Amino acid sequence: MQMPLYFDYMATTPVDPRVADVMQQCLTLDGIFGNPASRSHVYGWKAEQMVESSRRLVAQLVNADPREIVWTSGATEADNLAIKGAAHANAHKGRHLITSAIEHSAVLDSCKQLETEGFEVSYLLPDARGLISADSVANVLREDTILVSIMHANNEVGSINDIAAISAVLRQAGVLFHCDAAQSVGKVSVDVEALGVDLLSLSSHKFYGPKGMGALYVRRRPRVLIEAQIHGGGHERGMRSGTLATHQIAGLGHAAKIAAAEVVDESKRLQRLRDRLWLGVSQLDGVSLNGHPQQRLPGALNLSVAGIDGETLMASLKDLALSTGSACHSASLEPSHVLTAMGLSDEAANSSLRFSLGRFTTEADVDHAVAHFCYALTKLREA
């Protein structure tokens, strides 16, 4: 059976073959298989060297100090560690947090858990283009606000928030700022110093590294305190215990190295392909764009198709692998919480599809997708 063309890169990416080669070197007897925490023999020393080399590569990708990178199992754990860890460590200063209604479930569910512990959370609504403004954050700041968590790029519509403007407001107020950057790191240039964030989550599998691996940036100066959420050994400077997966870390490090070298040119290429895709499908009646037309990820395209249920349309697009929203809610029958928060009706939200292009998408793939989409939509409207 011929596999459908993959247009769901915002959910996950294949491991780049160059990354897989590096990972393989850490899995066999003649490779770097040791426990990085083993300090009594050469196998552990080599593994530790690999881990620290990868830490430097990830730090370089986001312009951080390597000592500010904490390994996690992915952005979900990084979000949990940042939000719960900062809230618990700073509860003596206040118990109010701010986030947005269109965050990833890892952020929203962490905030809901804190609400059961007596914390208060303000949920900001985005504008019609999926953006959270610095003014909207400033308007709900309180004396007891200790943490704000706003994503860099939205995982459904791709809109990119002005994180630097938000951080300027929070620095003046003395409030910690966490940013979920799972969708943006490796896809656009991300500089933690320029953004001004205190905590930043990233995920390996969003930029061609292995699944099950991520990291949390934790600012050292001024020092950000977080309380560990996983205990047992005091690894990662006491912030995240557990034996480190050397092969996973090596994969993330090499993926970061490739992304750092290619992100500028690759972003331009993906934007050209995305615009080609949009030009091809936007000529059909009833097709509209969701999210900001310019301020968005280069490979992201979320659109609504008036009068056609998204699941029905997707079922007609057998040659294409795409989604109707976040992969974390792909089994849900509820309309996208992102699109409804942006003001779309349930009907419009349910008629939406998310195309996302990536490193292995070609111009021929895009042209095939346009032709298949136009054919399927025309047939459904004729039925």
Image (cartoon, rainbow, N blue to C red):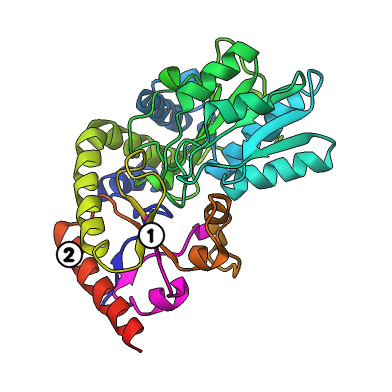
| Disc ID at residue 303 | 1
Residue that protrudes farthest toward the front in the picture:
285
Mark 1 residue crowding within 10 angstroms, few (<14) / some (14–19) / many (20+) = many
Q: Position of residue 43 (x, y in %)?
A: 44, 33
Q: Position of residue 21 (x, y in %)?
A: 28, 47
- In front here: 117 or 85? 117
**Is residue 180 shown in magenta?**
no
Check disc 2 and give the amino acid type.
Asp
User: Pointer 2: residues within 10 angstroms few (<14), some, or many (20+)?
Assistant: some
Mark seen at residue 275: none
Residue 244 locus on image (x, y percent):
53, 37
Magenta-tinted stretch: 302-327
Which residue lies under the disc numbered 2? 367
Helix, strand or loop for disc 1: strand
Q: Quadrant of residue 64?
A: top left
The structure residue drawn at horizontal position 33% and vertical position 75%, both measured from the top left corner, is 317
Q: Is residue 64 visible?
A: no
Between the C-alphas of marks 1 and 2, the distance is 17 Å
- Location of the C terminus by quadrant is bottom left
Q: How many marks?
A: 2
Please state which amino acid type lies under the numbered disc 1.
Leu
Q: Residue furthest bottom?
A: 383
Task: Say if 165 sits above or below 304 in the image.
Answer: above
Relative to residue 345, is residue 72 depicted above or below?
above
Residue 302 drawn at (x, y percent): 39, 56
Which quarter of the rendered picture does the N terminus lie within?
bottom left
* Residue lying farthest to the right in this orientation: 118
- Nearest the viewer among 316 and 359 is 316
Q: Residue, x 76% and y 18% (percent of image)?
A: 143
